[in-house]
Image (spheres, rainbow, N blue to C red):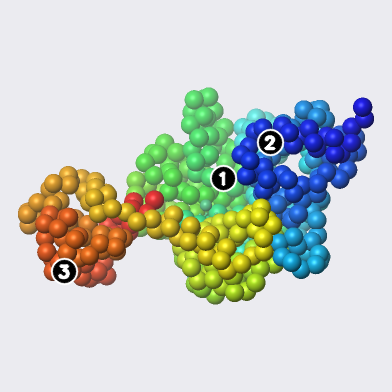
Amino acid sequence: MTKTASSVWKECLSFIQDNIKPQAYKTWFEPIKPIKLSGEALTIQVPSKFFYEWLEEHYIKLLRVALLKQLGEDAKLIYDVRMENSYSSNNPHTVKFPSSNRNPIVPQGVTVPMDLNKRELKNPFIIPGIQKVKIESQLNPNYNFESFVEGDSNRLARSAGMAVANKPGGTSFNPLLIYGGVGLGKTHIAHAIGVEIKDKYPDKTVLYISSEKFTQQYIDSVKGNTRIDFIHFYQMIDVLIIDDVQFLSGKTGTQDVFFHIFNHLHQNGKQVILTSDKAPVDMQDIEQRLLSRFKWGLSAELQSPDYETRVLILQNKLYRDGVEMPDEIVEYIAKHIKSNVRELEGVLISMIAQASFNRKEFTLVLAKQIVDKFVKNTKREVSIEYIQKIVSNYFELDVATLQSKTRKRHIVQARQLAMYFAKRMTKASLASIGSQIGKRDHATVLHACKTVDNLTETDKQFKKYVEDITKKLTF
Ligand code: ADP
Ligand code: MG
């Protein structure tokens, strides 16, 4: 029997169906149409660019196994992205993907041929011996400056990043440290700088690496007795981008080796770019000499985007995905999701998935449902009991001490913080909070809340308590 696109795809589907949840199958595989088989290359049609990215990100392994079974070792998969908007009742129209007008670092486009056998990223970290090695930059070309929406919240970081990209190693922003909370775009900017440098200076060796991977490589090099090679390897890089350096806290060996690499690069006019979830002053368990190096350059903070920027970010994302959504829905999402950009994107992804799954249009009702779910997940109500536990843990007390009558200052503060968080994070009345936290009355709770508010404004250490505990309570 000769194979056709549909026969091959049918077999793939039955394998896929056995391996994933029915809803996921329905959402992501039923809408796919097999359209062409030539040799070992199967072309499938997907409804949008977003769809293709989602498949690549979440189901590539499964697809690969299914295809290898059907087409053998040389199987290839090609996506054909349909240029029509299946998410609204509009007639099919052409989706214009923005042309970024630059040479991609890896081949990519709307129709994406993919060599299934080479999907795994090549390990760029083969320790070089004498022969030259090719170092893959590990940059994601989608994280570029064009796709990074500018706003007040990120202007400094963005323009510092641009300046560094124009003259790597040649500005006083060395190192450039970008810091800020989760999902605010640190990784995106870090890649964007690297991508821009590769565009402008193709001969420069750029390397992006997470601190976690860096640490792991270092540990491996110690085990394998190749520590010196490890250091030499990193000293060859022209632009070194290390993401999430807070991860190095407490890891003295890795910090030490990084210190040497850093000094070498810096002395030789090479550029170092770092990201962190904290400002240098707030980093803990990072050696002083390393911290002082961080301060040599520029630290730029990424803040939460304001409403206008959130709208722009959503519009930008929709545009890139070739999806149309009514303004009022975009505005609704931007109004309600304030925490970070990753969540904004999360809501969009859910919207698109839900709408395509149910073949529904985007509606405010749907937006509301999804936003509610997101907001609830992040701000789920915690119990007063739980708050007391977290606060006590944080100050290394037990709950009984926290509730006791003692007037020792640090215990009083802990108690006041527990009251403050109970007021902020639960719907309980002042009286009920008081009775649950050491049988106090409502006036005591009110006083506690005011005290915490005041101290947060005037006392830096205290502010940090509030931030730390907030984090513990919300994750
Ligand atoms: P972080 O590393 O700070 O946790 P990321 O860089 O991973 O955050 O960003 C989370 C998501 O939000 C990414 O998909 C990123 O592309 C997107 N994002 C963040 N800031 C912006 C922005 N200003 N414009 C467009 N997309 C953004
Ligand atoms: Mg990140």
Q: Which residue is mark 1?
A: 209
Compared across the picture, whether 394 is left or right of 474 comes to left
Question: Is 289 in front, or is 28?
Answer: 28
**In x, y percent, where is residue 138?**
64, 45
- The N terminus is located in which quarter? top right
Identify the residue shown where x is 63% and y is 41%: 22
How dense is the environment of label 1, judged by Cα within 10 Å: few (below 14), some, or many (20 and up)?
some
Question: Is 201 in front, or is 142?
Answer: 142
Identify the residue shown where x is 67% and y is 32%: 18
Identify the residue shown where x is 20% and y is 70%: 450
State whether residue 258 is above or below residue 366: above
Q: Which residue is mark 2?
A: 17
Q: Closer to the N terminus: mark 2 or mark 1? A: 2
Identify the residue shown where x is 11% and y is 64%: 441
Q: Which mark is residue 314?
A: none
**In x, y percent, where is residue 265?**
55, 48
Question: Is 337 in front, or is 180?
Answer: 337
Q: Which residue is mark 3?
A: 447
